[in-house]
Image: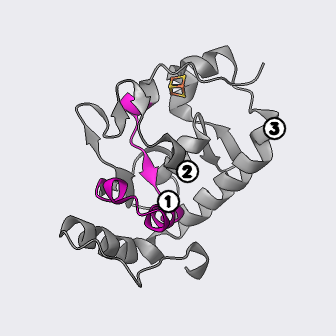
């Protein structure tokens, strides 16, 4: 049996959804202003800290949960951050592994922590990309802060502003 999410919402209520550069790039491409307005700079913790960065970007939390956790569901599911797409798996020094928090708390993982075979290749590639972007974070942090500043100052017009992961 492979991992199946039982939609208990524990992860949305307890974890900080980390945002990487390709997430920002995606949201800029689809004009997801509501999402970009809720990206904040936070102190790195947990597995992100192990990548040697002190600060990173994440979705804002409100009322004890991710700001996009609404009525028991993710309201941005189709464009959710890469780490949410990977969860309950996460990048680790040995590739893609069960997230340490999920090992103890995810009800789906308690039933089975087996990576869905049909998605394994895609998720492993995504984990590699997230790893690369976390390692490169100090190099693109200022660029992301500039984009977020434009959103928070009410000047979200970003014609001409594009960020490319492959450019960093
Ligand atoms: S904690 Fe696990 S089972 Fe619960 S919603 Fe998150 S991924 Fe699904």
Residue at 76% over, 41% down: 119
Percent position of residue 32, x then y: 40, 58
Is tag 2's residue or tag 3's residue first in the polypeptide sequence? Answer: 2
Q: CA distance from mark 3 to mark 1?
A: 23 Å
| CB within 8 Å, label 2 to label 3 | no
| Residue that sits furthest to the bottom in the current view | 160
Q: Is mark 1 within 8 Å of ligand 1?
A: no
Q: Nearer the viewer, residue 45 or 118?
A: 118
- Determine if the magenta segment contains residue 23: yes
Q: Is residue 141 above or below residue 57?
A: below
Q: Is residue 5 left or right of residue 3?
A: left
Q: CA distance from mark 2 to mark 1?
A: 7 Å
Q: Is residue 144 left or right of residue 25?
A: left
Where's the C terminus, which quadrant?
A: bottom right
- Determine if the magenta segment contains residue 50: no
> Which type of secondary structure does the marked residue at label 3 adopt?
helix
Is tag 2's residue or tag 1's residue first in the polypeptide sequence? Answer: 1
Return the residue at label 2. 82
Return the residue at label 3. 118
Return the residue at label 1. 23
């Amino acid at each position: 049996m492979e991992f199946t999410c039982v939609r208990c919402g524990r992860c949305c209520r307890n974890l900080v959804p980390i945002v990487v550069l390709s997430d920002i790039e995606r949201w800029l491409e689809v004009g997801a202003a509501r999402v970009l307005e809720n990206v904040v700079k936070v102190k790195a913790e947990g597995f992100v800290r192990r990548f040697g960065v002190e600060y990173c970007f994440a979705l804002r939390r409100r009322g004890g949960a991710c700001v996009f956790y609404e009525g028991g569901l993710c309201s941005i599911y189709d464009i959710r951050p890469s780490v949410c797409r990977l969860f309950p798996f996460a990048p680790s020094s040995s590739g893609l592994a069960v997230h340490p928090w999920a090992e103890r708390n995810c009800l789906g993982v308690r039933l089975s922590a087996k990576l869905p075979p049909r998605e394994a290749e895609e998720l492993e590639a995504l984990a590699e990309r997230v790893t690369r972007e976390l390692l490169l974070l100090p190099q693109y942090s200022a660029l992301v802060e500039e984009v977020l500043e434009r959103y928070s100052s009410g000047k979200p017009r970003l014609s001409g502003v594009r960020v490319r992961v492959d450019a960093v």
